[in-house]
Amino acid sequence: KCWPMDAGRFITLPLVITRDPETGVRNVGTYRMQIYDGQTAGMHWQTQKGGTHHERVANDLGKEKIDVAVALGGDPAIIWSGSAPFPPGLDELAVAGFIREEGVEVVKCKTVDLEVPAHAEIVLEGYVIPGETRVEGPFGDHTGYYSMEDHYPVFRLTAITHRHKPIYPTIVVGRPIQEDFYLGKATER
């Protein structure tokens, strides 16, 4: 929790991994997560983002849930690629591998049918039930203003794995210039 009117504690630098239920195409996005309790969190999938598209497809197909993995930490190229606004269908881990000049090693999750970067510090596994929402926010956002509360999907936790003595990565957002400015500057360049 960084700012006085934040609705609660937030994970601000997650790599949220989903697959399109129809095509199997992976998406890695940086979507903040508001912690509700030990088992649930708000998933701030904005309407134009890949995770939201995957949830919509799952809903249209009548799927009961969509698997979600959240990788925290690891190689900076992977963290950056999750925040970059790539065209739909472009695999963020492939871009990170291109930048690194070496592929990104992935490992299978324990409770969901997804792969995560093998060198992540912490991995949260779970799912979203299409159409299930809960109020998320307000949140002191990148613009320097609060994004107001609204309904967003609920992430339900099924497992946590981590390295020995993991390092928890986070980023402070809010009135510019904060840490997120430099991710944006790299993307702009």
Image (cartoon, helix red, strand yellow):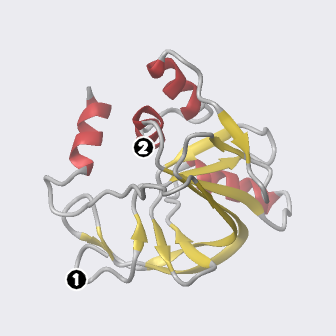
Q: CA distance from mark 1 to mark 2?
A: 25 Å
Please tell me in which quadrant of the rendered image residue 37 appears: bottom right
Q: The residue tagged with tag 2: helix, strand or loop? A: helix
Residue at 55% x, 55% y is: 164
Question: Do labels 1 and 2 touch, CB within 8 Å?
Answer: no
Residue at 28% x, 41% y is: 184
Left or right relative to 111: residue 88: left
Against 171, is 135 above or below?
Answer: below
Against 37, is 66 above or below?
Answer: above
The residue identified by callout 1 is 4
Q: Quadrant of the C terminus?
A: top left
Percent of width and height locating residue 168: 42, 58
| Mark before the other along the chain sequence, 1 or 2 | 1
Percent of width and height locating residue 12: 39, 61
Percent of width and height locating residue 180: 27, 50
**Which kind of residue does numbered mark 2 sit on?**
Ser
> Residue 167 — which label?
none
Please tell me in which quadrant of the rendered image residue 84 appears: top left
Residue at 86% x, 63% y is: 62
Against 70, is 152 above or below?
Answer: below
The residue identified by callout 2 is 83
Residue at 13% x, 52% y is: 177
Percent of width and height locating residue 49: 53, 50
Left or right relative to 79: residue 108: right
**Which kind of residue does numbered mark 1 sit on?**
Pro
Q: The residue tagged with tag 1: helix, strand or loop? A: loop
